[in-house]
Amino acid sequence: MNDLMKCNLQLFADGSEGGADAVGIAGGADGESAGQFATDTGATAAGGDENADAQKEATFSEMIGGEYKQQYERALKRTLGQRLKTRDKKIAEHETFRGQVAPLLDKLAVKYGVSDASNIEAIMQAADKDNSFYEQYAAQRGVDIETAKQLLVAERITKEQERRQADEQRQQEFQQKYNGWLQQAAQVQQIYPEFDFETESTNEATGENFRRLLNSGVDVRTAYEVIHRDEVMGGAMQYAYQSAKRDMADARTSRKARVNENGTSSQQAPAVYDDMAKLSYEDDQKNQSCYPSRRKG
């Protein structure tokens, strides 16, 4: 499993995040720039052109020491923070295990006459020579002591293979799940351009909740909208307000245009009379031209 997979698997399994322990690593107290740090720790690719590599390093140092300094430092802090958090967790697990095993090692050291209980190799060698360890196992299987030892070795090998296969299966399942999240993230970014899956997953404030939602089966878009519901709702309300405001403005413009059209029409509407006896000869002719049914026979 490559380093990136290990990092992602550990991140989503533990909910570990970049901590504050790495703050200040990229830029020291003496004001040393991140560009100098990267140059000092960079390695020239074997077999590459030295001048080209030097130019690339100089360009890279200039970028991360200038325009992209803050982005570089944030990425460095996040990466180192994750590694430190993982390291501290493993150290704590080791200490816990050691505390649980220590009493057993003390007893075995006394039994086999090993002066140093921390010398596990010496204790194991003495235990291998102790046939009483294997008597019950051999009796249960109807074999001699030497065969029992060989069977136990074979069982240990089989269990180790099963453990390795289970670990590989778990890694493959996670990889499939992670690839699915990346595909969903690409679609979410089309709706929310500010969304970035890596940034969201490692966010110190909300990253743990985001990962927990994903691990529980929630899709990426829903998880993002749940975590940022206030911003999402605020954006939706603002969009609805602007849309309604625009529609109202368009409606007013349309009504105004219709009024102007009616008021500036060059065609005069025909006169209407309730009493036909009041019509003049000219009005009567106009009226007949507009209403043919009223023409005299």
Image (tube, rainbow, N blue to C red):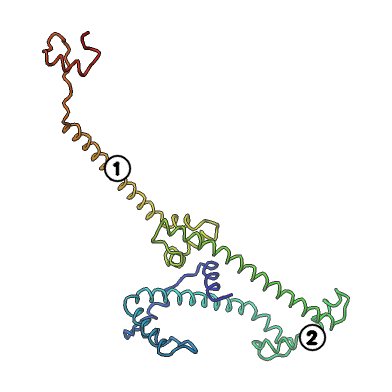
Neighbourhood count class around disc 2 (C-alpha, 10 Å): few under 14, some 14–19, many 20 upward: few
Q: Amino acid at mark 1?
A: Asp
10 horizontally vs 293: left or right:
right
Q: Amino acid at mark 2?
A: Asp
279 horizontally vs 66: left or right:
left
Which secondary structure lies at badge 1?
Answer: helix
Q: Position of residue 50 (x, y in %)?
A: 43, 90
The quarter of the rendered structure image containing the N terminus is bottom right
173 horizontally vs 192: left or right:
right
User: Residue at 40% across / 89% down in the picture?
Assistant: 51
151 horizontally vs 256: left or right:
right
| 222 to 130, vertically: above or below | above
Observer-nearest residue: 75 or 108?
A: 75
User: Residue at 68% across / 91% down in the picture?
Assistant: 115
- Which mark is nearer the camera, 2 or 1? 1
The quarter of the rendered structure image containing the C terminus is top left
Q: Quadrant of residue 261?
A: top left
Dot 2 or dot 1, earlier in sequence: 2
User: Is residue 37 in view from this perspective?
Assistant: no
User: Is residue 39 in view from this perspective?
Assistant: yes
Residue beneath label 1, please? 247
Residue beneath label 2, please? 130
Distance Cα–Cα, label 2 vs label 1 = 90 Å
Q: Position of residue 154 (x, y in %)?
A: 78, 78
| 184 to 112, vertically: above or below | above
User: Residue at 13% across / 16% down in the picture?
Assistant: 283
